[in-house]
Amino acid sequence: MSENSELDVLLKTEQTFPPPPEFAANAEFRDPEVYGRADADPESWWADWARDLDWIEPWESVLDWTNPPHATWFDGGKLNVSANCLDRHVAAGRADQVAYHWEAEDAGLEDEPVTGVGSDAGGRISVTYGWLYEQTQRLANVLRERGVGRGDVVGIFMPMVPEAAVAMLACTRIGAIHNVVFGGFSAESLKERMESSEAKALITADATLRRGQPMPMKSAIEGALEDLPAMETVVVFNRCGTTPPMKAGRDIGWTESLEAADPVCEPEAMEAEDPLFLLYTSGSTAKPKGIVHTTGGYLTHATATHRMVFDLKPDDVYWCAADIGWVTGHSYIVYAPLANGATSIMFEGAPDFPARDRWWEIVERYGVTILYTAPTVIRSFMKWGEELPAAHDLTSLRLLGSVGEPINPKAWLWYHEHIGGGRCPIVDTWWQTETGGIMISPLPGITTTKPGSATRPLPGISAAIFDHNGDEIEEGGGTLVLTRPWPGMARTLFREPERFVSTYWEKFGPATYLVGDAARRDEDGYFWIVGRIDDVINVSGHRLSTMEIESALVSHPDIAEAAVIGIPDEHTGQAIIAFVIPNDEATGDSSDELREHVATRIGKLARPKEIFVTDDLPKTRSGKIMRRLLRDIADGKELGDVSTLRDPTVMAEIEAQVGEKDRT
Ligand code: WT7
């Protein structure tokens, strides 16, 4: 294909991309002095950003870092997040401004946007700041009446609808801590996260649309809810008009309760360091970590980075195409865009429904100016062909973003050419659930980009590459660390303060944050993220723990032992491969059943791509599974030293089994 050779030529030339002159001329940040200014005094840099927010009480000190890794940002300050996202815009006369142009998965091409209704109306709706303001206050009052208040944890398990944002905002209004669980997770995963966060309420929906059909949510989790005695209230939003079972005394309907509720709810004055939300993410063990983010620092970091990285302007139509269930959705669909008063797109469905040009139809329809998505999606678009975006007018786009995993230069160049028309800067943004907001990224009006590199830490952020001894590597590869506190940093792990310290802050001392990624720094000081160095797999930008999948596999009655690895995958970045040892009673070939078992335990995204049934696994004499060797086999690599294995002959057997499968 000519397409490929053109890309290959570009790849070989290692072309770099300075900001286009017109873009740079109009960018809010166009002078590189901003880096020096922020570095010289990071505290006043962040304080300046914090001053853009509405504070009920001013802070007394910007940062207390006398007892690392425990940071206090904006101590003494009081604010309310929902008031920053809604009240101040309404007060400034912007109640009628659109916060979200929302599209139902099954919106027809002719559907006209409707204002003043919720997503249960389907089709296309224009959600204004005024509407969000009213819905949020009503829901906040419903929660309050049910005894939910400051410091209580509320679960949110919702489809991609504006009501999910309302649910989050309503929690922040009354000082409750939300714990959003991605709608694609299983009932088991939801239960585990509700249990360990001690949630007393849950906000969910009857169903979500998938390829035109309602896929049940509430009835799918009914059994899990029965096992949660602490769950006092379940608010059910009726997205699809199905009729899930409702338990008297516990379950209440969204529409009826909101209609009956007082439309005015005074925002709670929260301390800057009060927890804002929990978000569970996979780590190196089977047990997910409950990342705790707080109020003032998080909102400062999210809003500041959103403005800097996306060069946000009042007339932008901004589209972060993530899901609200991940941190990207929290920071860059809900909190930063709303606090910054932006107009966003929110889309309920998948990029290929009803057709593979759905996104380009949306970009054209609304005149989207900024698009922020993940490399895995870009690679799908590449596969589907450039004719699809070419058939739409995408000239409204002025900036593109990438997040979630390293973007391969080929996908970067394709995105630049076929989506950005060669004219839009690309911001490859590196960050994590734990960092709260973007940390390493170009500033689009300043940074010359190199395809595949997230470039440099943002102003005020300090990152480095360390070797095993904790010595900095100026140029070369090693482990990525963050060497200065930042306002959006996670403060702890919910109910696991020691695990917080030991996971992130022990290896190189209590003031150095261990990221868990390997990275390289080049001669220009640019960072190139390689990938995870812990037992975490990144599938399509979603973080999964090998141990979590292994424990799901061994929970199947047929399986005695399991080892899970991630291998490179052209489309999903990494793919999950499992090696399982059946127990003596196991019957027949159960690969498909096992994959479904994992889907039921964790969620569809954790389903292994391939399962190999073996008689043994490579273990050291102390019994530790050597995943490195399994990875070599799966990659078809020469095996390295196997002499440390308890039984070196197992490798030949596994190799034979894998080879067998490859031929069939
Ligand atoms: C891990 C964090 C950040 C929101 C989505 C994922 C990988 C993330 C990039 C990027 C290379 C990236 C890292 C990181 N990652 N962005 N631009 N380039 N790698 O959040 O689930 O907390 O995962 O995603 O490995 O540690 P998460």
Image: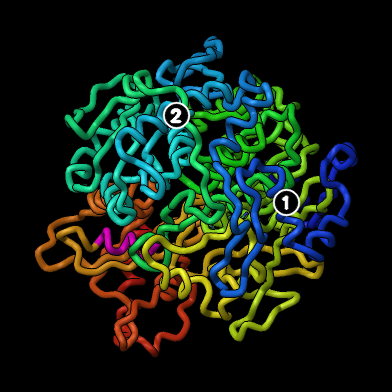
* Residue at 73% over, 37% down: 312
Q: Position of residue 492 (x, y in %)?
A: 47, 64
Q: Which residue is mark 1?
A: 8
* Residue at 53% over, 42% down: 329
> Toward which corner of the image does residue 217 lie, by quadrant?
top left
- Give the image quadrant in which the ligand numbered 1 is located: bottom right
> Toward which corner of the image does residue 356 lie, by quadrant?
top right
Tell me if 524 is positioned left or right of 625 in this view: right
* Residue at 51% over, 15% down: 116
**547 falls in the magenta region:** yes
The front one of 656 and 246 is 246
Q: Which residues are magenta?
A: 545-553
Q: Are marks 1 and 2 in contact (CB under 8 Å)?
A: no
Mark closer to the chain start, 1 or 2: 1
Amino acid type, residue under disc 1 in the picture: Asp
- Numbered mark located on residue 163 in the image: 2
